Amino acid sequence: MRFREFQKKIGQFKVFSLADVRAIDPDFHRTQLSQWVQKGLVGKLRRGHYFLRDEVGLPADETDLFLISNR
């Protein structure tokens, strides 16, 4: 899967896990996610939880921070 396609599908989630990704695409390989983290396209919050990076970085309004803390 290309990153733009992934971004469109996973964009509804502020924070997502590998299980969320596999629910969207069961054939998704974890190595692809690791490559996107290394390239800076995806950020890693903690083991198994990620977020999409944008120009600003981590989403920072109060609602987003609440969602992140509950994951």
Image (cartoon, rainbow, N blue to C red):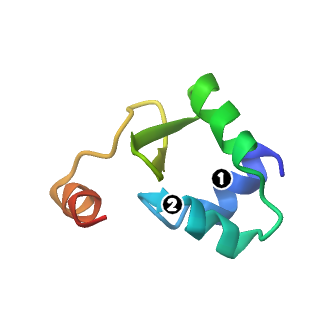
Q: Residue at x 84, y 52 (%)?
A: 1
What residue is drawn where x is 23% and y is 66%?
A: 70
Indicate the quadrant containing the C terminus: top left, top right, bottom left or bottom right: bottom left
Residue assigned mark 2: 17
- Label 2: state its secondary structure: strand
- Three-letter residue code for mark 1: Gln
Q: Residues within 10 Å of mark 2 (few under 14, many from 20)?
A: some
Please indicate whether residue 66 sits to the left or right of residue 36 in the image: left
Query: Can you give x and y, in whole percent of width and height, for residue 68 in the image?
Result: 28, 58
Residue at image position (58%, 68%) is 19
Residue found at x 32% / y 46% = 59
Q: Is residue 31 above or below residue 68?
A: above
Is 8 on the left-hand or right-hand side of 68?
right
Q: Relative to 27, does residue 50 appear above or below in the rendering?
A: above
Q: What is the secondary structure assignment of the residue under circle 1?
A: helix
* Res. 11 image quadrant: bottom right
* Mark 1 crowdedness (10 Å alpha carbons): few <14, some 14-19, many ≥20: some
Quarter residue 38 falls in:
top right
Give the side of residue 66 with respect to residue 35, left or right.
left
Q: Is the residue under label 1 in contact with that under label 2 (CB below 8 Å)?
A: no
Instruction: Tell which tag, 2 or 1, sits nearer the viewer.
Output: 2
Q: Position of residue 56 (x, y in %)?
A: 38, 32
At label 2, the amino acid type is: Ser
Give the Cα distance between marks 2 and 1.
14 Å
Does label 2 or label 1 sit earlier along the sequence? Answer: 1
* Residue situated furthest front in the rendering: 47
